[in-house]
Image (cartoon, rainbow, N blue to C red):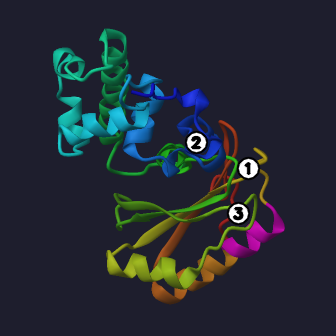
Amino acid sequence: MNEKKSIKEWAADDRPREKMMAKGKAALSNAELIAILIGSGNSELSAVELSRRILDSVDNNLISLSNLTLSDLMRHKGIGEAKAITIMAALELGKRRRAAEANLPAEVKDSKDTFERFLPFIDDPRQEHFLVMYLDQSHHVLKVECVSNGGTSNVIADPRIIFKSALNIGASCIVLGHNHPSGNTRPSEDDRLLTKKFVAAGKLLDITVVDHIIIGIERYHSFRDYGEMTF
């Protein structure tokens, strides 16, 4: 029987770590993410194949996977105590992150609240993401989404699509956001023109554009905080 290659010996396109670096974490399957955690498989299965087998044992349900005990995980050949603990620790972090998100106040009170809600939607800060938060009349969050991403500047932000979504979910207000991969939060002239365009469109539909947040590295710029929403 041929010995299975370790991840380091795989072709570059098949290596989960290199794939994450090249394409971002969202491009990896659940099995590939677990393979990064365990690092190697066994004499019969690669790390990804072993990870798939583990997922198959819980019908590919991550919630069920997070409920497995140390002994449950160690029943799989190639998963020792250290690897089992690593998987359990990663899943526990996921649980705690969801709990932290759930504890955010329902009402958005200021730009800092918006910044903290937008951050999880920027999965690759090297690319520009355009984000929208939909609010009711009392500024309770109805939905947050990334409407486009890619490249290093000028992502597509189509007001028709965004306001259609706002109308569909009954939003009274929206907050715009995007990141600058450079880390510089200073608004460009294009940023100002886009904001002005959205504010004008919102007035026609009776949907208020509350703010536009530009996200950099650990900081942000709020048009509203700087009195720049009076178009």
Image location of residue 120, percent across then percent down: 49, 45
The answer to whether 196 appears left or right of 148 in the picture is right
Marker disc for residue 181 = 1
Q: Dominant secondary structure of the magenta stretch?
A: helix
Q: Nearer the viewer, residue 224 or 32?
A: 32
Q: Seen from this angle, which residue lies furthest top?
A: 81
Asked if residue 80 lies in the magenta stretch, the reply is no
Which range of residues does the magenta coloring cover? 188-195
Q: Residue flagged by tag 1: what amino acid is it?
A: Pro
Instruction: Name the residue carrying label 3.
Output: 228
Query: Which label's residue is closer to the chain start, 3 or 1?
Result: 1
The answer to whether 58 appears left or right of 215 in the picture is left
Image location of residue 43, percent across then percent down: 38, 23
Q: Seen from this angle, which residue lies furthest right?
A: 189
User: Do the CB atoms of the residues marked 2 and 3 lie less than 8 Å apart?
Assistant: no
Q: Residue at x 65, y 62 (%)?
A: 150
